[in-house]
Image (tube, rainbow, N blue to C red):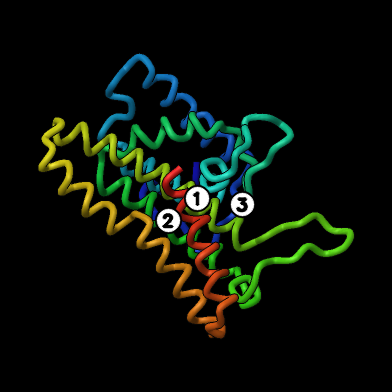
């Protein structure tokens, strides 16, 4: 899946894997998901951490699969950079098999937030200063709202997956579940995502005008909608 010894951390920059490694990734995700339909144990606990670590090598592809509303198992769509052919539902099922292990799932969530941060840092001052305008002869694209919508959707799915794991672990003990969810929300919920957008705007020294304040709220509102969707 990665071409590296099990457990070795993924590089900071997303790397394109070999075709053989990508095929192995697709096979493992699909196989464990199919196996899980008839076996509640799903992924053996002994290998969850290594599989979660391997998944971080494909964080950009996973980000596409979870955050873009298309069926990436169809040949006309392609994830970046590895063209992984997996449906969002299949990937979510695979993540559910890893979420029972908090440390393993933390690896995935941290890598996803790092990728979201990179996407947010790709935005420029004009993205935060004013509403995007259409250019003549070009398709209309609002980069900031696209990044907001996708980052909100991806982090939301991971939070819902972890919620189910916490629900299973606390045996529906409401007090324990509420406590666990509170900590999870602060660590991996919308407040963390919101801070990434606010920090980017601050670091770009976007002038505080009525227009820029409305624009930032529009971006945050879009991310919030994605996160709660």
Q: Is residue 213 above or below residue 63?
A: below
| Residue 4 rendering spot, x and y as whole percentages | 46, 50
Whether pointer 3 and pointer 2 mark residues with C-beta atoms closer than 8 Å, the reply is no
The crowding category of the residue bearing disc 1, from other C-alpha atoms within 10 Å (few below 14, some 14 to 19, many at least 20), is many
- Separation of disc 1 and disc 3 at Cα? 11 Å
Labels 3 and 2: the sequence-earlier one: 3
The one nearer the camera, 217 or 54, is 217
Which of the 4 image quarters holds residue 183? Answer: bottom left
Marks 1, 3: nearer the viewer: 1
The answer to whether residue 20 is visible is: no
The kind of secondary structure element at disc 3 is loop
Which residue appears at 49% of the width and 48% of the height?
226
Q: Looking at the rendered structure, which numbered label has been put on residue 48?
A: none
The one nearer the camera, 45 or 200, is 200
Q: Looking at the rendered structure, which numbered label has been put on residue 16?
A: 3
| Residue 7 rendering spot, x and y as whole percentages | 36, 50
The crowding category of the residue bearing disc 3, from other C-alpha atoms within 10 Å (few below 14, some 14 to 19, many at least 20), is some
């Amino acid at each position: 899946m990665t071409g590296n010894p099990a457990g070795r951390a993924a590089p900071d920059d997303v790397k394109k894997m070999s075709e053989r490694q990508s095929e192995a990734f697709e096979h493992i995700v699909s196989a464990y998901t199919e196996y899980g339909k008839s076996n509640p144990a799903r992924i053996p606990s002994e290998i969850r951490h290594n599989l979660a670590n391997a998944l971080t090598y494909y964080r950009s592809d996973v980000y596409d699969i979870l955050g873009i509303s298309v069926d990436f198992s169809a040949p006309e769509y392609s994830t970046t950079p590895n063209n992984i052919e997996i449906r969002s539902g299949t990937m979510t099922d695979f993540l559910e098999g890893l979420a029972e292990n908090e440390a393993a799932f933390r690896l995935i969530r941290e890598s996803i937030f790092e990728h979201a941060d990179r996407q947010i840092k790709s935005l420029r001052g004009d993205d935060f200063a004013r509403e995007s305008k259409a250019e003549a002869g070009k398709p209309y694209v609002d980069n900031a709202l696209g990044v907001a919508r996708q980052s909100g959707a991806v982090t939301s799915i991971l939070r819902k997956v972890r919620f189910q794991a916490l629900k299973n672990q606390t045996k529906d003990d409401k007090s324990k579940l509420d406590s666990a969810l509170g900590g999870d929300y602060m660590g991996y919920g919308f407040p963390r995502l919101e801070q990434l957008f606010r920090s980017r705007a601050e670091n770009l020294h976007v002038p505080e005008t009525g227009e820029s304040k409305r624009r930032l709220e529009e971006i945050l509102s879009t991310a919030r909608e994605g996160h709660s969707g």
